[in-house]
Image: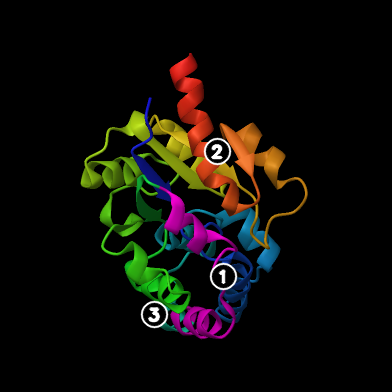
Amino acid sequence: MPVDLIIFDCDGVLVDSEVISCRAHADVLTRHGYPITSEQVFERFLGRSTRQANIEIESELGRKLPEAYHGDLQDELFRAFEADLEAIRGIHDVLDTVTQHVCVASSGSHQRMQVSLGSTGLYERLAPNIFSASQVKHGKPAPDLFLFAASEMGVPPHRCVVIEDSLAGIAGARAAGMTVFGFHGGSHCDDGHAETLRQAGADLTFDDMRQLPELVRRVEADALAG
């Protein structure tokens, strides 16, 4: 089975944004009447779309989040991204090296990815092959986004490898019938995150993005040998 497409999640895989994002979400939600810590945001909402998170939060609140919340969150995120965001170490080297087609499938909005990927020099390298959960009915952990990305790229699911750091992403990739690598090299990943990803169904885990080309070659060789 040759690998024809590598599908990257964005936050925590291409850009080291999860700590920044969880902190911003916690601060803004707390200001708008939903007290929560950044650790709780990480545990409950990592890898899920803002739309899904908001539905859950509003159900618990018994009311809609105020319109100001959405603008405040965007402003806080974008300010923090522009000030502090960095690309995952080694990702530019990987994009120089891999021979497969690549794309992005993220729970984040296109506007958010324009800022996060743009501030790290990745947007121009990956556009226009950047897909958002806003383009499908169900975000991760449903398979819709991964299947949509593969269809848009013209590659069957069984010839795709997904790179994910979240449980929702692992579940979505597996449901899509794709090979999934669990990446735990972001600053948000603790010592047990690799095992958590394996238990969630990751085919393998790694913490240095520069390992990716060799891992893909290994998967292809194992498939041929099998």
Check disc 1: other Cα within 10 Å, few if <14, some if 14-19, many if 20+: many
Secondary element type, mark 2: helix
Residue 63, placed above or below residue 27: above
Closer to us: mark 2 or mark 3?
2
Circle 1/circle 2 CB separation < 8 Å: no
Which residue is situated farthest in the right direction here? Answer: 191
Residue 165 lies within the magenta run: no
Circle 1/circle 3 CB separation < 8 Å: no
Calculate the distance from the C-alpha at mark 2 to the C-alpha at mark 3: 45 Å
Secondary element type, mark 1: helix
| Magenta stretch bounds | 73-98
Residue 126's mark? none
Q: Position of residue 7 (x, y in %)?
A: 40, 47
Residue 169, placed above or below residue 108: above
Looking at the image, which residue is at 57% across and 35% down? 202
Q: Which residue is mark 1?
A: 21
Q: Which residue is mark 3?
A: 67
Q: Which sits earlier in the primary sequence, circle 1 or circle 2? A: 1
Give 88 or 143, whichever is nearer the viewer: 88
Q: Position of residue 36 (x, y in %)?
A: 65, 68
Would residue 81 appear left or right of 55 to someone viewing this image?
A: right
Looking at the image, which residue is at 68% across and 63% down? 187
Q: Position of residue 185 (x, y in %)?
A: 65, 55
Q: Amino acid at mark 2?
A: Leu
Closer to us: mark 1 or mark 2?
2
Q: Amino acid at mark 3?
A: Glu
Give 105 or 63, whichever is nearer the viewer: 105
Would residue 13 appear left or right of 145 to someone viewing this image?
A: right
Check disc 3: other Cα within 10 Å, few if <14, some if 14-19, many if 20+: few
Q: Which residue is mark 2?
A: 215
Residue 164, placed above or below residue 22: above
